[in-house]
Image (spheres, helix red, strand yellow):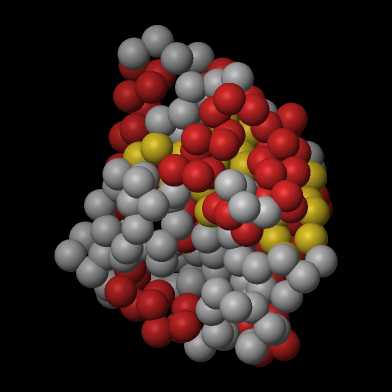
């Protein structure tokens, strides 16, 4: 189950086909890429509700929870992690694991890398995320654990595979989740790739580093 990035307000399954088309054959798996509702017309928790509905529909139509991996990049990576937290909180059967590429997990934007890596990542500057977050949050708190899963208790989650670039502004959104998940007893594979930009796996047709990262994600799946 793939959840595309785009700050919760743009992009679609079509914009992220280089990732999903790259993952499917490598993992020898079917991929469903969800066209979830976008902000500002549909603020939190619309995207989360759609992700939960998609997962539960998979179970209702015969997919086994242990045969499903939830994946996503950037906002979609945060949404994937929030989906795990919400499923656990609701007592649902959890999937086998999650793949998170450059996940945006903290809509409160408290990571030091937003400042320290400002200007180092060709994709985004550090101030972008604080401007975008209110579009999705609406009137919700930026530390609501179902909107910003960095602020959730992470106990009881399935294994996580996490990637982030060393120079991206969202680096700390990955590092802090990895640290807190491990402290909560969750199995975590986390790679910080030197000098690679935000969600570099999307460049798989052109970048050997992107292809290798998709290979690693497929191995985890």
Q: Nearer the viewer, residue 121 or 149?
A: 121
Q: Residue furthest top?
A: 62
35 lies left or right of 172: left
94 lies left or right of 42: right
> Which quadrant of the figure contains the C terminus?
top right
Residue 101, percent across and down? Answer: 61, 53
38 lies left or right of 127: left
Residue 123, percent across and down? Answer: 55, 74
In this rendering, the count of numbered labels is: 0
> 141 above or below 44?
below
> 16 above or below 216?
below
Q: Residue furthest left?
A: 41
> 62 above or below 132?
above
Q: Nearer the viewer, residue 169 or 16?
A: 16
> 54 above or below 41?
above
Residue beneath the point at 23% across and 69% down: 40
Q: Quadrant of residue 155?
A: top right
Q: Quadrant of residue 156?
A: top right
Residue 159 visible in the snapshot: no
Residue 63, percent across and down? Answer: 45, 14
Q: Residue furthest front?
A: 206
Residue 114, percent across and down? Answer: 63, 83
Residue 26 visible in the snapshot: yes
Residue beneath the point at 50% across and 35% down: 21
Residue beneath the point at 62% across and 71% down: 170
Residue beneath the point at 40% across and 19% down: 59
């Amino acid at each position: 189950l793939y959840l595309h990035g785009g700050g919760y307000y743009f992009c679609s399954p079509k914009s992220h086909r280089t990732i999903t088309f790259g993952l499917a054959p490598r993992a020898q798996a079917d991929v469903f890429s969800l066209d979830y509702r976008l902000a500002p017309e549909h603020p939190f928790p619309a995207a989360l509700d759609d992700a939960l509905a998609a997962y539960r529909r998979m179970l209702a139509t015969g997919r086994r929870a242990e045969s499903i991996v939830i994946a996503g990049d950037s906002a979609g990576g945060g949404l994937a992690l929030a989906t795990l937290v919400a499923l656990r909180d609701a007592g649902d059967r959890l999937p086998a694991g999650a793949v998170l590429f450059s996940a945006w997990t903290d809509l409160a934007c408290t990571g030091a890398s937003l400042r320290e890596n400002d200007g180092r990542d060709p994709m985004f500057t550090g101030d972008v995320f604080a401007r975008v977050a209110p579009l999705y949050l609406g009137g919700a708190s930026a530390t609501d654990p179902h909107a910003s899963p960095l602020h959730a208790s992470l106990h009881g989650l399935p294994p996580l595979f996490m990637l982030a670039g060393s120079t991206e502004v969202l680096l700390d959104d990955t590092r802090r989740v990895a640290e807190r998940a491990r402290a909560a007893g969750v199995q975590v594979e986390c790679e910080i790739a030197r000098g690679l930009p935000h969600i570099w796996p999307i460049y798989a047709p052109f970048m050997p580093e992107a292809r290798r990262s998709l290979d690693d994600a497929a191995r985890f799946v």
